[in-house]
Each structure stands twice: as structure tokens, then as C-alpha cells.
Amino acid sequence: MPEYEFELTASGALTDEVIDALVEAGDDDATFSTRDGLTFAAFSREADTLLDAVVSAIEALESVSLRVLRVDPDELVWASEIANRTARSRQSIDQLVKGQRGPGHFPPPATHATRNPLWRWSEVEAWFAEYEGRPPDAERSIVLRSINGALEARQGLRSASEAQPLRRALQRLLAS
């Protein structure tokens, strides 16, 4: 059975009782850390599909009172993260971005809202797949982007003062 690696970011207290409950339930395939009131669970989970792995991990964390906020790796990446994910140097990525190496036409940044530009990983991964002559790993990008969208919509429903109209609108959008 394939093994999938991903990280979940959650709110809620990570206590010894929470960890014990996860281990008792057989969910002992994550390494935990906390920072700034958030819990991070790095999973290496066996499952038939990436979707099954991520959903089962979310269900496991939420069964012990943690609230999952998102799945990482995130869709938006800096050049240093592109280098990390592609096992290349930061300088190599800079040269590809500037068209000094490779076939050119590197995807444009999705945003310049931060000090450094951010790219959409799905576009970068597709570019590298073409450059390296292999099929793109579209499933991972689609699954993670979709789950993160659902988690974000769920957060919006919790904070909306008029949740019912928003819930109906989201159901209509998802049905089409």
C-alpha cells in the first residue's frame, strides 16, 4: 500500500491525553509540534489513495478535539520551497525563473503580495513535468487544493453571522 506524506495544521491543545488517544486508536503515524497556539501533525500515512490518507488523518485529529485548519504543503510556494520540493538548489530555481536555464516560460508568480513572489505549486509542478518529460502529479495538487478549499469554507461557515444562506450557496456551488 502506498505511503503519503503531508502535514495538517490544527487548532486546539496538544496534550498527552490527545496523543495517547490517537495512539490507542491506531493513529500513530504522525509527528507533532506546536507553535503560536497551533498544532502541526506531520503524517506518513499508508492508504489506497492520497485522498483516503488525508481525510482519515483529518478525521483522526478531529476525533480528539483538534480542529484541522489546512493541509500542507501549501499550494503557494516561494522559490526556496520550489527548490526544496524539486531537490534543486535555490540558484538553479532562480536561473529557471529568469529563463537563463531550461526551456523558458516558467510560470508567472501568482502574487507579489509578499517581499518575495509566490507561485502556485500546481503550475510549477506541471512545468517541471513537461521540462523533465514525465506526466504531472496532478492528483496531489487537486486533492490538497480541494481539501483546503473545503476546510476554508467550513471555517467561513463557523464565523458567518448568517451561516444558513452561506451554507445553501456553498451547496449549490459544489453541486454544479
Image (cartoon, rainbow, N blue to C red):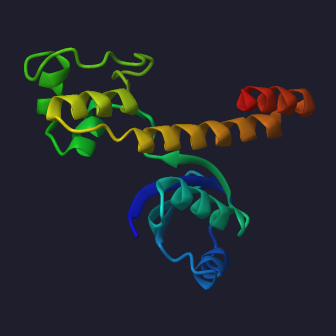
Q: Where residue 135 sits in the image (x, y, percent)? A: 27, 38
Residue 106 seen: yes
Query: Image quarter for residue 126?
Result: top left
> How far across and how far down the image is residue 175, in percent?
74, 31
Vertical position of residue 151 compared to residue 5: above or below: above
Residue beneath the point at 13% across and 15% down: 99
> Which quadrant: the N terminus?
bottom left
Is 32 displayed left or right of 60 in the figure?
A: left
Residue at 66% from the left image edge and 62% from the top image edge:
59
Q: Where, by quadrant of the figure, is residue 58 drawn?
A: bottom right
The quarter of the picture where the C terminus appears is: top right
Residue 137 lies left or right of residue 7; in this view the side is left
Toward the bottom, the furthest residue is 24
* Viewer-closest of 27 and 133: 133
Instruction: State the residue at coordinates (71%, 35%).
Output: 153
Give the image location of residue 10, x and y in percent: 61, 54
The reply, left or right, for residue 109 in relation to residue 37 is left
Image height of 79 relative to 19, above or below: above
Residue lying at 57% horizontally and 81% vertically, measured from the top left: 26
